Image (cartoon, grey):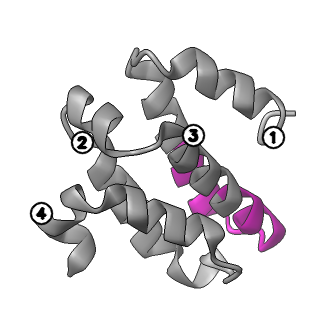
Amino acid sequence: IYIHSKALNHNIYNVLHSIEESSMNMAQFSDLIIIMIQNILKLNTQELVSRMDVDTITRVIQRLYDQAENDKDDETLDYCLDMLDELLASNHSFTRNMTDKLDFGLLA
């Protein structure tokens, strides 16, 4: 329920950092994480930039991708790639920084 609520919009930074810092296997929560990130990506551009650390969302997507790759979860892999495509296509000012980071991780 929380991932669908407006409350998430006010706490994106903390939620993403908690997921990133957790040692849990994200696979068991992949559906919820995907929905949450998709909801974040629907936010207004300025809200997106001001309320979250874009590097963190990229790292969360990459970590989810890596774990899905290990689990051979093609559906989650596709969702991760779609979310990264959406970020890249958004023409936000952080796109270049994100691609630099991906060059050393997911796409390397």
State left or right for residue 44 relative to residue 93. Answer: left
Left or right position of 14 against 81 = left
Cα separation between marks 2 and 4: 12 Å
Whole-Å distance between the Cαs marked 3 and 2? 17 Å
Q: For mark 3, what is the residue?
A: 55
Q: Magenta stretch containing residue 66, yes or no?
A: yes
In this rendering, which labeled residue sits more in front, label 1 or label 3? 3
The circle on residue 42 is 2
Quarter the C terminus occupies: top right
Which residue occupies 67% across, 83% down?
A: 24
Query: Splitting the image into 4 quarters, where does residue 35 fall?
Result: bottom left
SS at mark 2 in the image = loop
Residues rendered magenta in the picture:
65-82
**Label 1 is placed on what type of residue?**
Gly
Please tell me which residue lies in front, 20 or 80.
20
Residue 99 location (% of width, % of height): 66, 23
| Residues at marks 1 and 2, CA–CA distance in whole angstroms | 25 Å
Query: Residue 90 in magenta?
Result: no
Q: Nearer the viewer, residue 47 or 35?
A: 47
